[in-house]
Image: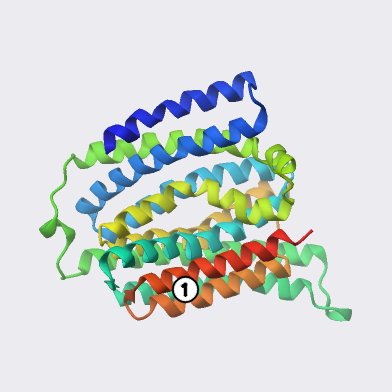
């Protein structure tokens, strides 16, 4: 199977060729760069699985989420420097929603269809669910603060200061979350993946492949996003729909496929860690970093999301928490998550 994915890497130079020569227009660049991300995601998934054998599923999931979100962080920083603040916010909301509903949904659906009811660590899932709800509430605070009417309505400067302060607090909370996750992994006395699986490549090689594939994903993602807006115009899609639905789906395709791959292999701890962990990293680290970067580059970005985005974030956070707390998943729960995402996507499609 890996030989097939390696052969599909030919799509990378093809996408670069179309980007440089502009042959076929933006739509062809968009399609080829999106397809090129698929073999890169498969290779990233194989390397992640190998690294997780050495490090354990929680650290492996954290590693995958970090590398997967590196592309999105770079892309959104570029967009922020160009003044596309609303697009960046929509992309943030869409990434959190997509990781919770699409990644976790397809993982539970596909894994459940193959293995029935799948088990995962309820303590880790409970921690992730609590952190996710904390992050969602934190992202709602500036909107409630900014939408207050009358004499209590704050100034734009106050909203910016509030966003900056929340950004610092969220980063601190994320660091504490990572420290706790690593300590809990090291202190766990249960059985580990080492006992059931043997790695097929050295850890250094796995990490090297992770790094190279991540760089390639960044390049392909930049090409893809560059062609996204003109392609969306040609296909009749609104900017909000593109930011919330299209950009996160395409930009996070690597994590999507990796999480589903490991769920098929009945490794729901790793799959859940990738899906929810990536959403947490977007909310607790990527988003506040973008707020602070906006201050540095002269493009202030507040954490005031529009009501559509807030409603979607709250709905996704609540249903994901309810599904993950019992330590079990099945294909019906996966279908429920995907159904909610389709409802949200349909609603955003009709927003002008």
Secondary structure category for the residue under label 1: helix
**Rendering coords of residue 72 (x, y %):** 54, 46
Q: Is residue 349 left or right of residue 15?
A: right
Image location (x, y in percent) of residue 279: 49, 61
How is colour applied across the structure in the image?
A: rainbow
User: Residue 32 versus residue 65: which sits nearer the camera?
Assistant: 32
Q: What residue would you read off at disc 1? A: 320
Residue that lies at the very extreme toward the left in this rendered image:
195
Q: Quadrant of residue 75?
A: top right
Q: Is residue 320 above or below residue 64?
A: below
- Total marks shown come to 1
Depth check: give the residue in front, 169 or 82. 82
Could you tell me which quadrant the N terminus lies in?
top left
Q: Residue at x 37, y 56 (%)?
A: 259
The furthest residue to the right: 150
Is 76 on the left-hand or right-hand side of 196? Answer: right
Mark 1 is surrounded, within 10 Å at the Cα level, by few (under 14), some (14 to 19) or many (20 or more) other residues, namely many
Q: Position of residue 246 (x, y in %)?
A: 61, 50
Q: Residue furthest front?
A: 113
Q: Residue at point 72% right, 46% down?
A: 84
Quadrant occupied by the C terminus: bottom right
**Residue 34 visible here:** yes
Would residue 115 appear left or right of 210 to someone viewing this image?
Answer: left
Tell me which residue sits at (74%, 47%) in the image.
236
> Quick one: 95 or 234, which is closer to the camera?
234
Q: Residue at x 67, y 27 (%)?
A: 25
- Does 129 sit above or below residue 40? below
Q: Position of residue 206 (x, y in %)?
A: 26, 40
Tell me if residue 88 can be seen.
no
């Amino acid at each position: 199977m890996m030989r097939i994915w390696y052969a599909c890497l030919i799509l990378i130079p093809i996408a670069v060729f179309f980007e440089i020569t502009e042959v076929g227009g933006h739509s062809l660049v968009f399609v080829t760069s999106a397809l090129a991300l698929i073999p890169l995601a498969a290779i990233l998934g194989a390397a992640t699985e190998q690294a997780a054998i050495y490090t354990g599923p929680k650290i492996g999931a954290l590693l995958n989420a970090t590398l997967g979100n590196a592309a999105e962080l770079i892309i959104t920083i570029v967009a922020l420097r160009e003044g596309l603040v609303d697009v960046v916010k929509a992309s943030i909301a869409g990434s959190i929603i997509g990781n919770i509903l699409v990644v976790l949904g397809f993982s539970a659906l596909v894994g459940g269809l193959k293995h029935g009811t799948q088990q995962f660590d309820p303590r880790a899932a409970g921690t992730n669910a609590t952190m996710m709800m904390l992050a969602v509430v934190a992202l709602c605070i500036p909107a409630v603060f900014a939408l207050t009417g009358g004499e209590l309505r704050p100034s734009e400067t106050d909203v910016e200061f509030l966003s900056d302060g929340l950004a610092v607090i969220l980063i601190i909370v994320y660091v504490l979350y990572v420290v706790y996750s690593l300590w809990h992994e090291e202190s766990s006395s249960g059985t580990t993946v080492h006992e059931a699986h043997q790695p097929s490549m050295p850890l250094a090689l796995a990490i090297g492949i992770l790094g190279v594939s991540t760089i390639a994903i960044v390049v392909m993602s930049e090409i893809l996003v560059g062609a996204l807006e003109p392609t969306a115009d040609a296909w009749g899609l609104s900017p909000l729909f593109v930011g919330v639905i299209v950009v996160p789906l395409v930009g996070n395709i690597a994590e999507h496929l990796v999480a589903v791959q490991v769920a098929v292999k009945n490794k729901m701890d790793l799959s859940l860690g990738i899906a929810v962990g990536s959403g947490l990293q977007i909310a607790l680290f990527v988003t506040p970093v973008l707020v602070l970067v906006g201050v540095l580059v002269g493009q202030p970005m507040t954490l005031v999301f529009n009501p559509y985005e807030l409603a979607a974030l709250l709905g996704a956070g609540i249903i994901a928490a309810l599904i993950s707390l019992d330590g079990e998943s099945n294909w019906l729960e996966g279908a429920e998550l995907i159904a909610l995402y389709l409802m949200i996507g349909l609603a955003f499609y009709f927003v002008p």
